[in-house]
Amino acid sequence: MIERLLLKHLTKKGKIAYFVGVILLLVLLGYFMLEVQNYSLDDDRITIVLAMIVVNLLWAGVCFLCWKKPKEEVLKS
């Protein structure tokens, strides 16, 4: 959902950085929450899903600020 809106405003490097960053950050979040903090998928499912959504939104904002296309390119596409 967010990708469709975001990807038309990112450069090619921004698209690559977005997907690689999301994968890495979600893996790190999963490791931290499941291994370090000892959350369980049965009891703390809502907490884990909300954390995943927040990480995705924050990384989308960082990618948009760093790798957005100039306005002329967005208007053409």
Image (spheres, rainbow, N blue to C red):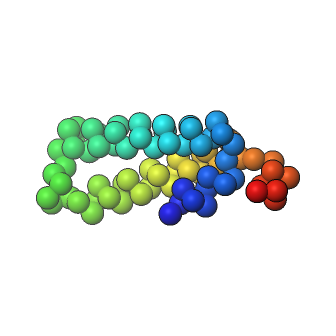
- What residue is drawn where x is 61% and y is 56%? 6
Instruction: Give percent across and percent down for residue 63.
Output: 61, 44
Tally of numbered discs: 0
Instruction: Give percent across and percent down for residue 3.
Output: 54, 56
Dividing the picture into quarters, in which one does residue 75 lie?
bottom right
Instruction: Give percent across and percent down for residue 48.
Output: 29, 55
Q: Is residue 71 visible?
A: no
Query: In the shown orientation, is residue 5 left or right of residue 29?
Result: right
**View extreme (front): residue:** 77
- What residue is drawn where x is 50% and y is 42%? 19
Instruction: Give percent across and percent down for residue 33.
Output: 26, 45
Dividing the picture into quarters, in which one does residue 17 lie?
top right
Query: In the shown orientation, is residue 10 left or right of residue 76?
Result: left
Q: Quadrant of the C terminus?
A: bottom right
Viewer-proximal residue among 49 and 73: 73
- What residue is drawn where x is 15% and y is 60%? 43
Query: In the shown orientation, is residue 55 left or right of residue 70?
Result: left
- What residue is drawn where x is 27% and y is 63%? 46
